[in-house]
Amino acid sequence: LQNVQIGSKEFKSLQAEIKKTQAELDKASNSGGKFQDAMGAISSGIAAAGVMSLGKAVLTTAGTFEKYNAILKNTLGTQEEATAAMKLIKDFAASTPYSVDELTASFIKFANRGLRLTREELTAFGDTAASQGKSFDQYTEAVLDALGGETERLKEFGIKSAKVGDSIAFTFKGVTKTVKNSSEEIK
């Protein structure tokens, strides 16, 4: 318990529950081991452990969101932009099989290269990754490679590319789109 980072109110509540459980266990063992007393003590112990696990999970999740918020604020420059990005990521994660962790990491990778992902781009990226049974992060890495002129990893997603003068032609599912050879256009 000493290693779990929780507020003093929650910690005192857990301490009280543990003391109560210990008292019930002592009572059960001193009263000749009555089955009902023992079962009550065990149930209380299980409940206390469940509360502790739930509390720890909630605190871990809250801490993770705080960390992501701080990274996004640093990356994007303002708290308003970080809040908007986190809302976009959480809303998108809620309606897809992708986790907030994975989406936040990808969002930050793009933002650090000066590119902001929109809901439409998140959807397109997610759909492309899912169509090939790949993770969102794998597709992110392939796109980031392509932004640097390395299009080899896009082949894993069924995307072929060819340089055409100052442009690049990408072909996916029989459809070819030619874009300028710039990070924003390739994205």
Image (cartoon, helix red, strand yellow):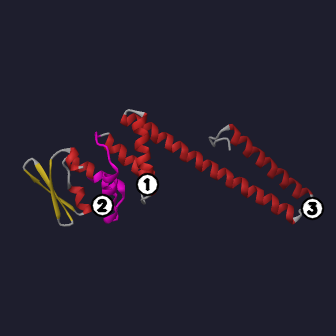
Residue carrying label 2: 128
Q: Which residues are magenta?
A: 113-142
Which residue is the site of mark 3? 32
146 over 131 or under it: above or below: above
Residue on which the image places disc 1? 93
The residue tagged with tag 3: helix, strand or loop?
loop
Q: Dot 1, crowdedness within 10 Å: few (<14), some or many (≥20)? A: some
Q: Please tell me whether mark 1 or mark 3 is closer to you in this view.
A: 1
Name the amino acid, label 2: Thr
Task: Tell me whether the residue at label 1 lies in contact with that at label 3, contact meaning CB atoms closer than 8 angstroms.
Answer: no
Three-letter code, disc 1 = Ala
What amino acid is labelled 3 in the image?
Gly
Q: Nearer the viewer, residue 31 or 132?
A: 132
Report how many numbered discs are placed on residues in the image. Answer: 3
Is disc 2 placed on a helix, strand or loop? helix
- Give the image location of residue 86, x and y in percent: 43, 44
Residue 8: where, in percent of width, then height?
69, 37
